[in-house]
Amino acid sequence: MPDLRVGVVGATGAVGTVTLALLAERGFEDVRAYASKRSAGKELSYGARDLVVEEATPETLAGGDLGLCFFSVGTEASRELVPPTAAAGTVCIDKSDAYRLVDGVPLVVAGVNDDALDHDPVVANPNCSAIQLACVLKPLHEAAGLAGVRLATYQSMSGAGDAGIEKLRATPPMEADLAMDWDLEGDEFTEESKLRAETRKILGLPELPIQATCIRVPVLVGHGQAVWVETEEQLSTEDACEALAAAPHVRLAEFPTARDAAGEDEVLVARIRPDMTDGRGLALWSVNDNLRKGAALNAVQIAETLLERRLLAA
């Protein structure tokens, strides 16, 4: 790998832990781990060695001589830590929703809209459900155009971070709190409104009708999506399958469950069939490991794309 010093902020959390594992697998050698003050000093396994966690502050990050830094922290923490790190010349890939819909900040799903990347100091990693959906919609849009999308998501507890994981493990599953936060500006969950807005930005389709119903389910890892797609042109099941099979980071499967998706790098797609209520519609089912392609893996793939295109200095 290139002579590139990489930082991982939020290294002790669910997504940060997966990020470190992926970086080790891909041969990134000069890696530093950062987290909150209470986690500073902990040792984390990284390949054949250990990393000592440093406290993430604007000063430590700006002075860390980092070429690239992944942020797997909450929105407010990202707003505090990303600007000084970027100002120090570090390319920041942020996984919170702090910058996703900010004009001028690319919102990228690797393999879907790589051309959005340039010499940007900050790149936003989308919501896990938006990543999963965009991987499926992009090849269908290229094949026949998109006229409208409806979907229901069944999102695992790890999508709520460490708190969600602890809640599922500590509570009988059917008594776990499965609620999501409300969007203060409407009658949707925040997850539903940002899924619409982020998918539109990723695909470059600002007027695409998208209606989502998002729920949390008592599953540890793996998001499911039942999707109904209306295309501008007629698209047969066979042609849809062919387009999806050829798409990056998508794999056709028989009938995958969240358990099948856990630990997998691709979005698994199945049950592609005509929508009997719409003459130009298709229905399908997909599942994805929300901690991998839905978060950490997508961020690492963004970094690899930046390196391949020489948009990230070694």
Image: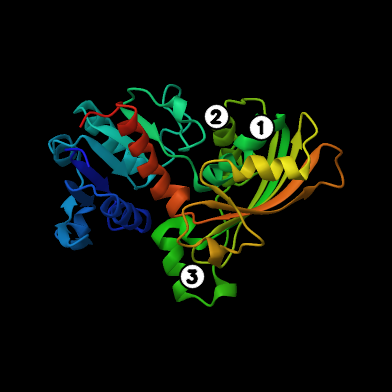
The quarter in which the N terminus is drawn is: top left
Residue under label 2 = 201
Query: What residue is rendered at 56% in x and 54% in y?
Result: 180
Which label belongs to residue 168?
A: 3
- Of residues 236 and 300, the one nearer the viewer is 236
Instruction: Mark 1 or mark 3: name the one nearer the start of the chain.
Output: 1
Instruction: Mark 2 or mark 3: name the one nearer the start of the chain.
Output: 3
Which quadrant of the structure image shows residue 89?
top left
Q: Is residue 208 left or right of residue 69?
A: right
Instruction: Mark 1 or mark 2: name the one nearer the start of the chain.
Output: 1
The secondary structure type at the circle numbered 3 is helix
Q: Amino acid at mark 1?
A: His
The secondary structure type at the circle numbered 1 is helix
Query: What residue is rendered at 26% in x and 54% in y?
Result: 24
Q: Nearer the viewer, mark 1 or mark 3?
A: 1
Q: Nearer the viewer, mark 2 or mark 3?
A: 2
Q: Amino acid at mark 2?
A: Lys
Instruction: Tell me the distance, in whole angstroms, between the alpha carbons under discs 1 and 3.
Output: 37 Å
Residue 165's spot in the image, x, y percent?
44, 65
